[in-house]
Image (cartoon, helix red, strand yellow):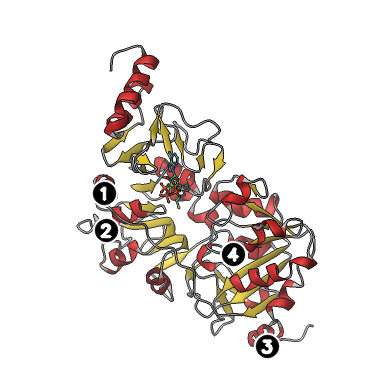
């Protein structure tokens, strides 16, 4: 029988320096890094510092708020980045052919890392161990729990600033290979500015939300704006992919109380949180806010179990048939599908559910209409015309489900920016052979 060791002895025996930990990464390995606010920067920096000792390391992750040293041109041959979502630090490298993008629904990513992209080394952030020897994945349960369970080697940065969160995101020290203690502040993602246009969009979206609804809110200023219009609602629920600052006040005020949900009743649930200290402090040691892996939270079959599920997401372009482009600007991969389709489908399958795409009617300072006759050449459709339902701009709400192509086009032209309506009407007349 092997000798019994208490968890704190096990933990101490696995404590190493960052340099020692990353010496276990070998050329040719696939290294998957922790997500968003839980990006383990000390480990990533130690790996990047050690680049001369590596050839052909593949790096994968979803959202990153870090500087992405491994995608810099001088790292060629040492690291190759293959992203499942792109952001400020990585999209240029993909555009210039120095890195790759792999497309996947967010809810399928744990499966992807098990079956298609097997993980050699997982680099993750964890909280300090609790009195029972469990560390928490903090604000990022998402695909991170899956890579911890499946990687050949798991290296964890123990950051005492990482919140300890509830749900299914705690791991025993026994199940991690190496610990590196390194405290750092969590990266911050500031909410976008809410101007008059975002306010108007928020108000239209809020008009579609009733007492007792369960909400999913995407990234950015529009979801934040929607939340400011919900103070008079009762018994809202939260089942969302991402939690940000805006929800904190509504939960504290009891507007979001999760009492009418069919599953995870009484608690707000998410798969990751990203924002400022406001949300990071709120989720710390807070049993009314729970984190679950993305193959639970984002599975459309799970989402649909709550009645009256409302999803709100944004996009880059919508064509006159209602095809939604949310991740590409022409051929340029801008972000990723993320959980948009997961939630649009989950909301569509939910009894009484509503799926909303909300966007400013123009881009590039008003020079470009986001409602277009044809999507830009090369762009991928994120949400198909069969999945789309409500489209909202600062000019109103277009309900598309159940409408003919002709009526869809009319509804979308009505909510386009007035400067672009004439051009869209011309296309309508050409396409449908009738006067607008
Ligand atoms: N043509 C050309 N450029 C466009 C454009 C268009 N139709 N629409 C937007 N852009 C440009 C903007 O000008 C802006 O450029 P900049 O970065 O140089 O300022 C950039 O694209 C981003 O546009 P914006 O609308 O400000 O982005 P956002 O931060 O509000 O994000 C999405 C919008 C659609 C990119 C983002 O929501 C996304 O990635 N969605 C897909 C994933 C998802 O929905 N996940 C589920 C929720 S968690």
Q: Are marks 4 and 1 in contact (CB under 8 Å)?
A: no
Of discs 2 and 4, which sits in the foreground?
Answer: 4
Q: Quadrant of the C terminus?
A: top left
Question: Which residue carries the number 1 mark?
Answer: 206
Q: Which residue is mark 3?
A: 9
Give the quadrant of residue 259.
bottom left
* Mark 4 residue element: loop
Label ID, residue 235: 2
Q: Earlier in the sequence, mark 3 or mark 1?
A: 3
Disc with the residue nearer the chain's start (1 vs 2): 1
Residue 291 x/y as whole percent? 48, 64
Crowd around label 4: few <14 · some 14–19 · many ≥20 (10 Å): many
Give above or below for 283 relative to 101: below
Q: Is residue 227 visible?
A: yes
Alpha-carbon span between mark 3 and mark 2: 46 Å
Of marks 3 and 4, the one in the foreground:
4
Using the image as rendered, state which of residue 102 and residue 75 is in the foreground: 75
Where residue 431 sits: x, y (%)? 39, 16
């Amino acid at each position: 029988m092997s000798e019994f060791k208490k968890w704190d002895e096990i933990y101490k025996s696995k404590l190493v320096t960052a340099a020692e930990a990353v010496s276990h990464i070998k050329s040719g390995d696939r290294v998957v890094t922790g997500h968003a606010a839980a990006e383990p920067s000390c480990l990533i920096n130690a790996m990047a510092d050690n680049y001369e000792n590596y050839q052909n390391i593949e790096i994968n992750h979803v959202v990153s708020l870090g500087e992405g040293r491994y995608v810099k041109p001088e790292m060629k041959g040492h690291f190759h980045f293959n992203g499942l979502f792109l952001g400020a630090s990585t999209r240029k490298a993909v555009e210039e052919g120095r890195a790759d993008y792999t497309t996947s629904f967010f809810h399928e990513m744990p499966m992807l890392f098990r079956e298609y992209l097997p993980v050699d080394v997982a680099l993750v952030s964890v909280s300090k161990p609790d009195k029972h020897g469990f560390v928490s994945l903090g604000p990022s349960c998402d695909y991170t729990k899956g890579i911890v369970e499946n990687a050949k080697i798991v290296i964890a940065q123990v950051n005492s600033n990482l919140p300890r969160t509830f749900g299914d995101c705690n791991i025993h020290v026994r199940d991690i290979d190496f610990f590196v203690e390194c405290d750092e502040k969590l990266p911050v993602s500031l909410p976008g500015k809410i101007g008059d246009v975002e306010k108007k969009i928020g108000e239209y979206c809020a008009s579609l939300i009733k007492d007792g609804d369960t909400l999913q809110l995407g990234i950015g200023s529009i979801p934040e704006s929607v939340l400011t219009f919900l103070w008079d609602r009762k018994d809202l629920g939260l089942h969302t992919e991402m939690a940000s600052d805006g929800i904190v006040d509504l939960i504290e005020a009891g507007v979001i109380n999760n009492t009418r949900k069919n599953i995870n009743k009484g608690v707000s649930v998410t798969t990751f949180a990203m924002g400022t200290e406001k949300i990071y402090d709120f989720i710390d040691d807070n049993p009314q806010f729970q984190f679950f892996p993305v193959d639970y939270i984002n599975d459309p079959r799970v989402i649909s179990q709550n009645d009256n599920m409302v999803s709100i997401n944004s996009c880059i372009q919508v064509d006159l048939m209602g095809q939604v482009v949310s991740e590409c600007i022409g051929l340029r991969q801008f972000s990723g599908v993320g959980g948009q389709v997961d939630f649009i489908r989950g909301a569509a399958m939910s009894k009484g559910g509503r799926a909303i795409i909300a966007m400013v009617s123009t881009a590039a300072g008003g020079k470009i209409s986001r409602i277009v006759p044809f999507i830009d050449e090369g762009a991928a459709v994120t949400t198909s015309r069969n999945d789309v339902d409500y489209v909202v701009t600062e000019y109103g709400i277009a309900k598309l489900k159940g409408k003919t192509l002709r009526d869809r086009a009319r509804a979308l032209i009505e909510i386009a920016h007035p400067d672009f309506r004439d051009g869209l009407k011309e296309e309508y007349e050409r396409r449908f052979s009738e006067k607008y």
